[in-house]
Image (cartoon, rainbow, N blue to C red):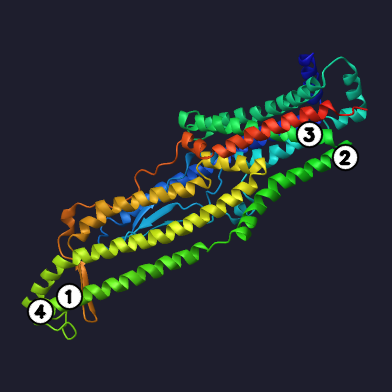
């Protein structure tokens, strides 16, 4: 009996104009969204290669402690499925001889209209278009048959209520998925034939399969919500109104209002203020270091019969007494410099830890509030899998610290051995006292930017996976139980 009910449901849905509309939307928008996103990725990858090449070529002869090393972040290959925060995320990491690194976004805006209206990628299509179509697909599943009298006839037969509602859920969902997978297959064929992206390779296919599984779970939640509303409302008009209001609530209002609530509940300083604090702390420590090293050199010069206040460092550089003073100073300054460098790193890390801790608390408040909506859990999951979500900010920080350590050990530390700076009175002399060409230095670059694995992305978002599973079961069970006691008259 159950099989006959499902077949009947599918036959009725297929003959409905809504199923044809959903099919057209899927086979047109999904391939188009995948194609456009892939072309944007190819352009971004070309721009990344060109930028890194110009950086290396332009700095072959640029050597010294003042050189600022740059590491370019490659675009995420999986961004073809969701652009997420791609326009916001940094695409370059810079670091200097003082160990100060920062992530920079210099993407630029080629088409402000695209930024204004947003991009239609796979994530957008599922989250906003297909989710709305799921409600439209199911809004009169129960109320429509009740109004036509069909539901009363079916319920009059010796068939369990749970089989009727189960058949409606399976029938609607199956027809919808046929259109969905028709769009997916069309998109994969289009990408295979027209782009250079190896979409059928393991590196793309495994994450995409996981994205599809999560998308199917998300759409199943919305289908059950749509049918539940159809059960709880009196007629089709009330059902479609309730469906649209609920869609606006879970797809727009809750995700957008949650960060605002978090900022009110737990306000923190802006990143600009924190950066100014770090700059002030660096300058404060540097000033103390300048005073101590100036006093050290003055004391050594005094021992050798020189007055640092009246000594002209430029005209009397080769004075034997000053040469002796410099040699003594070079032996002693290393420990002092290391002391201040360590202090500078510790103080800056302390400011960053304090700020990151507060920012993490605020983000968690916003995420937990937004998770009232399954749209938010779906968003966090998909964008972290494609490396265009909040998790990528932490990943950039990890790679940035690794790049800073690499440039220090392989570049700046080798120059620093023969780099000297002397502060005598109000005059400063600095430079590289050696043959820098003999060091065999290469322009430092970010050679291996590591994106999190699929497993890591899923583990880091286990909360959202559990929530999607919970919402799927919850709304399915509630729909079944609500229909069991539903008045079909």
Label 2 or label 1, whichever comes before in sequence order: 2
- Between marks 1 and 3, how big is the CA–CA gap? 81 Å
Which residue is drawn at the image coordinates 60% and 48% (left, top)? 367
Q: Report which residue position mark 2 lands on.
A: 237
Q: Nearer the viewer, mark 2 or mark 3?
A: 3
Q: Nearer the viewer, mark 2 or mark 4?
A: 4
**For residue 183, what is the image quadrant?**
top right
Q: Is 440 placed above or below 472 here?
A: below
Q: Is 242 placed above or below 303 here?
A: above
Kindly indicate whether the residue at mark 4 contacts the one at mark 3 (C-beta within 8 angstroms): no
In the rendered image, which quarter contains the C terminus? top right
Q: In this orientation, which residue lies closer to the viewer: 230 or 462?
A: 462
Q: Secondary structure at mark 4?
A: helix
Left or right position of 156 against 270 = right
- Between marks 2 and 3, how big is the CA–CA gap? 15 Å
- Between marks 2 and 1, how big is the CA–CA gap? 87 Å
Q: Report which residue position mark 3 lands on.
A: 228
Left or right position of 431 against 212 = left
Q: Report which residue position mark 4 lands on.
A: 303
- Between marks 4 and 1, how big is the CA–CA gap? 10 Å
Q: Secondary structure at mark 3?
A: helix
Kindly indicate whether the residue at mark 1 contacts the one at mark 4 (C-beta within 8 angstroms): no
Which residue is drawn at the image coordinates 82% and 22% (left, top)? 161
Left or right position of 113 against 330 = right
Label 2 or label 3, whichever comes before in sequence order: 3
Residue 220 seen from this side: no
């Amino acid at each position: 009996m159950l099989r006959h009910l499902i077949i009947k449901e599918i036959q009725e849905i297929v003959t409905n104009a809504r199923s044809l509309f959903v099919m057209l939307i899927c086979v047109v928008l999904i391939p188009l969204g995948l194609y456009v996103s892939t072309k944007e990725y190819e352009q971004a990858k070309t721009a990344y290669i060109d930028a890194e090449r110009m950086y290396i070529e332009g700095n072959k002869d640029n050597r010294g402690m003042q050189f600022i090393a740059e590491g370019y972040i490659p675009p995420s290959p999986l961004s073809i499925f969701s652009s997420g925060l791609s326009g916001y995320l940094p695409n370059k990491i810079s670091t200097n001889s003082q160990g100060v690194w920062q992530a920079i976004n210099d993407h630029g805006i080629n088409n402000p209209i695209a930024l204004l209206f947003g991009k239609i990628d796979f994530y957008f299509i599922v989250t906003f278009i297909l989710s709305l179509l799921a409600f439209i697909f199911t809004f009169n599943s129960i109320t429509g048959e009740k109004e036509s009298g069909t539901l009363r006839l079916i319920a009059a037969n010796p068939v369990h209520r749970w089989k009727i509602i189960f058949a409606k859920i399976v029938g609607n969902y199956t027809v919808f998925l046929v259109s969905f997978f028709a769009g997916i297959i069309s998109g994969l064929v289009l990408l295979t034939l027209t782009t250079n992206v190896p979409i059928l390779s393991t590196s793309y296919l495994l994450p995409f399969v996981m994205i599809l599984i999560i998308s199917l779970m998300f759409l199943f939640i919305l289908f059950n919500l749509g049918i539940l509303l159809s059960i709880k409302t009196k007629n089709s008009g009330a059902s479609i109104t309730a469906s649209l209001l609920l869609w606006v609530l879970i797809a727009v209002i809750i995700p957008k209002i949650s960060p605002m609530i978090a900022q009110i509940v737990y306000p923190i300083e802006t990143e600009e203020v924190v950066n100014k604090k770090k700059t002030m702390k660096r300058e404060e420590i540097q000033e103390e270091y300048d005073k101590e090293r100036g006093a050290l050199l003055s004391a050594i010069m005094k021992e050798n019969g020189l007055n640092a206040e009246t000594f002209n460092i430029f005209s009397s550089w080769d004075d034997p007494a000053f040469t002796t003073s410099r040699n003594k100073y070079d032996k002693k300054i290393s420990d002092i410099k290391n002391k201040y460098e360590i202090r500078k790193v510790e103080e800056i890390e302390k400011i960053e830890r304090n700020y990151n801790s507060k920012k993490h608390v605020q983000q968690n408040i916003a995420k937990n509030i937004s998770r009232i909506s399954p749209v938010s859990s779906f968003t966090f999951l998909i964008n972290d899998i494609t490396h265009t979500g909040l998790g990528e900010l932490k990943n950039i920080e990890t790679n940035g610290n690794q790049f800073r350590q690499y440039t220090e050990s392989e570049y700046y530390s080798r120059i620093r051995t023969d780099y000297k700076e002397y502060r005598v009175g109000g005059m400063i002399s600095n430079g590289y006292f050696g043959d820098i060409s003999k060091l065999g230095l290469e322009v430092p670059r970010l050679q291996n930017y590591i994106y999190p694995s699929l497993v890591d992305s899923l583990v880091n978002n286990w909360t959202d996976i559990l929530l999607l599973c919970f919402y799927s079961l919850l709304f399915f069970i509630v729909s079944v139980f609500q229909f069991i006691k539903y008045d079909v008259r």
